Amino acid sequence: MAMIHVANLVKTFTVNQRGGGLRALFAPRRRTVTAVKDISFALQEGEMVGYLGPNGAGKSTTIKMLTGLLVPSSGEVLVDGMIPWKNRIRYVQKIGVVFGQRSSLWWDLPVMDSFDLLQAMYSIPRERYQRNLKMFREILELDDFLQLPVRSISLGQRMRAELCAALLHEPQLLFLDEPTIGLDVVAKERIRTFIRYVHEERHATIVLTTHDLTDIERLCERVMILDHGKILYDGALKQLLERFEGQRRLVVTLADPLAAPRLPGLSEPRREGAQVFYSFDPKTHSAAQILAMLNEEQTILDVEVRRAGLEDTIRRIYEQQLLFPVDDRTGKAN
Ligand SMILES: Nc1ncnc2c1ncn2[C@@H]1O[C@H](COP(=O)(O)OP(=O)(O)OP(=O)(O)O)[C@@H](O)[C@H]1O
Ligand SMILES: [Mg+2]
């Protein structure tokens, strides 16, 4: 039996439509938003998966259902044999949760007091609590700000404290929703080292959502890519990269700052500031050929050819809604 088993999971929200004048006051128009549409996957004990997707894809909604904060509209979730939104008291003992976008610590209390409160709430045996706290203080370098109120510490310090708080009770499952959001490069690296430690030394099962693809490259062998509530890819990161290996990008700056002409045989270009990006496969196109086509209609000021990395690959999947077949038996893309 998998550690996390998700089948045909759906979550819809009903939201009030804005506008509509006075009439809307008496008969408010309602609209349903399907945040998660029929997703299924399995995660084995000790596995770590990167959960990726653009803003609004449904990542946090999934994590909230997995952690029992939201009840699904339909579908199944079993985590270590338990239904997350039932048996709450027993379930929260098993899991650690960090939501990077909001704090689970007490804002006005010193960091250390939050930890003490958590010890009481989770009834963590004194000896275990002190052993864990000692270790996390060292690895996460918490000592400089342990006595400061949470509201006065920096974002990077707070995230380290959040991770410590989520792990004091030694959960075997960890749900991390954007744990590196807004952090500088050094702070991100420290968080990654810690996540790797928890995964490798404690064999925790981890679901990690992030917009930082370096997090994924450093930490995850398996990724799931979500968009519009559907899983577009579930499989090995290596396989995903291999699939697009050899893809190139031509980056041009055109004299006309608003032009981004579509070229025959190529996908829609993307504009970012003054630059226009064309993705191409060197087996079917050459950079020179593309430049010649462009040159007929535009004045080109600057040119660069790049190899496609993970970021390009992911963007292509989002843009083209590329769906990879998922093998039912393994839950992995083939
Ligand atoms: N409580 C709610 N009520 C109504 N709609 C909601 C609610 N929570 C989420 N949604 C909607 O569900 C969709 C998915 O939201 P979700 O927060 O899961 O996305 P996400 O993938 O975590 O995005 P981000 O990368 O921005 O954090 C969005 O369209 C969002 O507006
Ligand atoms: Mg989110």
Image (cartoon, grey):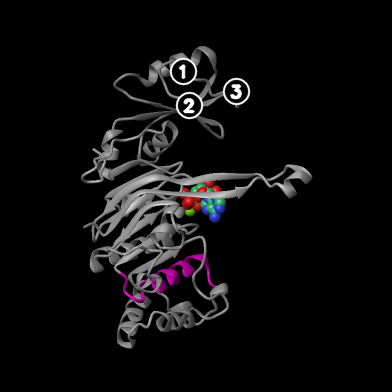
Q: Main secondary structure of the magenta part?
A: helix
Residue 112, image x, y percentages:
46, 82
Q: What amino acid is labelled 2 in the image?
A: Pro
- Is 252 located above or below residue 184 in the figure? above
Task: Determine the CA span between mark 3 and mark 2.
Answer: 15 Å
Identify the residue at the far right of this view. 22
Q: Does 30 appear in magenta?
A: no
Sequence-earlier tag: 1 or 2: 1
State the SS at label 3.
loop
Q: Does 161 appear in magenta?
A: yes
Foreground residue among 21 and 160: 21
* Mark linked to residue 45: none
Q: Quadrant of residue 274?
A: top right
Q: What amino acid is labelled 1 in the image?
A: Leu
Sequence-earlier tag: 3 or 1: 3
**Quick one: label 3, few (<14), some, or many (20+) residues within 10 Å?**
few
Sequence-earlier tag: 3 or 2: 3
Quarter of the picture containing the C terminus is: top left
Where does the magenta region start and end? 153-171
Residue depicted at 35% across the width and 60% down the height: 192
Residue 85, image x, y percentages:
41, 64
Residue 122, image x, y percentages:
39, 79
**Quick one: label 2, few (<14), some, or many (20+) residues within 10 Å?**
some
Q: Quadrant of residue 136?
A: bottom left
Residue that label 3 marks: 256
Q: What amino acid is labelled 3 in the image?
A: Asp
Residue 130, image x, y percentages:
34, 84
Residue depicted at 36% across the width and 80% down the height: 133
* Mark linked to residue 269: 2
